[in-house]
Amino acid sequence: MSLIAPESVEIRLGERSYRILIGSGLLGDARHFATVPAAASALIVTNTTVAPLYAAALRSALAGRYREVHVLELPDGEAHKDWPTLNLIFDALLARGADRKTVLFALGGGVVGDMTGFAAASYMRGVPFVQVPTTLLAQVDSSVGGKTAINHPLGKNMIGAFYQPQLVLCDLATLATLPPRELSAGLAEVIKYGPIYDMDFLAWIEDHTDALVGREPAALAHAVRRSCEIKAEVVGQDEREAGLRAILNFGHTFGHAIESGLGYGEWLHGEAVGCGMVMAAHLSQRLGGIDAAFVERLTALVRRAGLPVVAPALGAERYLELMRIDKKSEAGEIRFVVLDRPGSAVVRSAPDAMVREVLAQCVGA
Amino acid sequence: MSLIAPESVEIRLGERSYRILIGSGLLGDARHFATVPAAASALIVTNTTVAPLYAAALRSALAGRYREVHVLELPDGEAHKDWPTLNLIFDALLARGADRKTVLFALGGGVVGDMTGFAAASYMRGVPFVQVPTTLLAQVDSSVGGKTAINHPLGKNMIGAFYQPQLVLCDLATLATLPPRELSAGLAEVIKYGPIYDMDFLAWIEDHTDALVGREPAALAHAVRRSCEIKAEVVGQDEREAGLRAILNFGHTFGHAIESGLGYGEWLHGEAVGCGMVMAAHLSQRLGGIDAAFVERLTALVRRAGLPVVAPALGAERYLELMRIDKKSEAGEIRFVVLDRPGSAVVRSAPDAMVREVLAQCVGA
């Protein structure tokens, strides 16, 4: 049971609007699911790591609302964010006679959320779903905004849909069981909101990095709420990433290349994004948007959050090749999210020679 | 080049509105693609049967608008409307560096259209696409309205999206090369619009069955246009099948069971729908919506169109099992589209015993 009432952030998207609830002990409390559509059955999609921790509590909370509540455990990790694993969800739905009203619950991190969301978007051309993110990264970023996808061997998140959940329920208590590496990975996406959108928030993160790494509840609660507020503002203005929303991909062009080049799962997504932000900062400096001091400030924060700041040696040609199949690319030209000043980001291209200089500067031996 | 200006039917769906162009010789004429978004590249998705007939003409028509126009030939037939074949489209797009603006062109029948549409809905979370249907069935039904899907071993069209094309271009000249069995299959969906929506159109079809089977251009043109008009009216009121749109599935609950029970591709979709309409008519009579004379009238028309009116002997239990996983089912209860009077359809359930009587009546030895 929650000891204090959860905080609420609204995502305003017309008839697709929904709420993010943020608080401690939410997922075991049936009251918080009162606004979710009723149906004969629900399917909780989770993974083998999260299931033993939280599936029983969520299942109990839903038992009064759905006659049947099934639990499907997927293998854990980004390496399984693929079609065969997605198809396990379809198999489970069809084997259990799930219909168009069946509600899917994504209980886990970004991989579980992305796959469950895409399954919900595609099963019978769309069934309702709820995000119950249990990692910091999923709570501050991937569970909010309706981006769902699986990976293709040739590129990350290449096959998916924009499909909004009915509710996002961020239970801060789940962060207590998060491995330290995963906590740091989530901090990468928290840090991101500072340089692209809110310099006050960046300063707050700098002041509270130790508290965040130390999992102080009040600090985590503020980080999650402010991150969700910023994401809600951006997504509310540009749901399908026609423009503004792309700034949320700061660090992701380099980051996706790292993830894909090393093989999915070698680095965590947030680790790649952390290092990718350092690389994007260097590129921003070369393009004239920020100075060396700001690059150093951001690099120091990424390092203090426990994230890598030196990129793996994939080779410059391989980096360029991988970045050309990024979704922001157009007509073969790589498009980067860069800072045009501290607190503001834009999408633009950069000369290959300049990108090579950044790679030479950021890649380890 | 078109000899006469094409007719146009508008699908009104707010910002997702688009036109259906209907005429002869359209697909080789660049002028008809002037409203389609420009991009660096386009991919024509077709199959091994249609490609030798029309791919070169379409490619030429697009060559002035796209720097690169690629052609991908899929294997032909409903049996290939599955994930591995869909993935061939993603492979082709990624291998060729397709970006978010790349336009997909579906050149073929319903299978090509459904798979290309779902690929367009999912590639990078959505790229533009154009339907160029080359079968009667696709021109009067599947290319219009934005339903896209692939089959799952446990059910037809179970994985897909509502995703609207930019344009539908019905080139009546392509119907000249259609095998007779495919022409009849298309007539099943033409006939469908009569009993569910427009008794005048039903009478017109009865008067022109020989002309349609004989492929008289004026008759085909009217059949395609009126079918598209009715579909546009219905879809314009209920894009995502929350209610009214379900009437377009008249004959499809029984029909999908036939297709799935025999194995996809054994009967053509339109053949299964033709026989399924006869079965649905018998059920409608038992439910009191129509009389025996109307059942006989519809059966006679289906037969004259060259379609089967006797259902395959799958066994009553298997029929019921297959129909329970139809997308219209709710909480395990099969929902049928039945006629509540000639020219009007509703969705409702029926007692299992009554469905068994219909099966006993309609299934061959």
Image: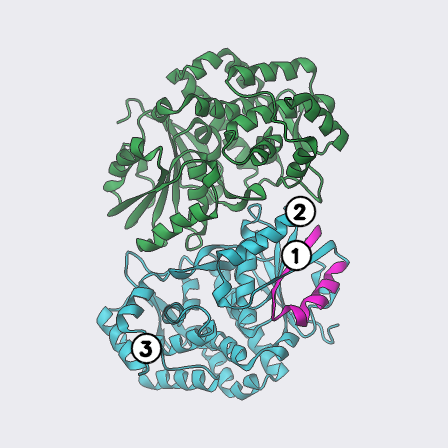
Chain colours: A cyan, B green
Residue located 24% across and 69% down the image? A352
Q: Distance from label 2 to label 3 (Cα)?
A: 49 Å
Q: Quadrant of residue A263?
A: bottom left
In the rendered image, the residue lying farthest to the front is: B365
Q: Are dots 1 and 3 on a single chain? A: yes
The residue carrying mark 3 is A313
Which badge, 1 or 3, is on the more N-terminal residue?
Answer: 1
Q: Please state which amino acid type lies under the numbered disc 1.
A: Leu
The residue carrying mark 1 is A43
Q: Please state which amino acid type lies under the numbered disc 3.
A: Ala
Chain for numbered disc 2: A
Q: Position of residue A205 (x, y in %)?
A: 50, 82
Indicate the secondary structure of the residue bearing disc 1: strand
The magenta segment is A36-63
Residue A175 has which mark? none
Which badge, 1 or 2, is on the more N-terminal residue?
Answer: 1
Q: Distance from label 1 to label 2 (Cα)?
A: 11 Å
Can residue B288 be seen here? The reply is no
The residue carrying mark 2 is A97
- The question of residue A354 being in magenta is answered with no
Chain for numbered disc 3: A
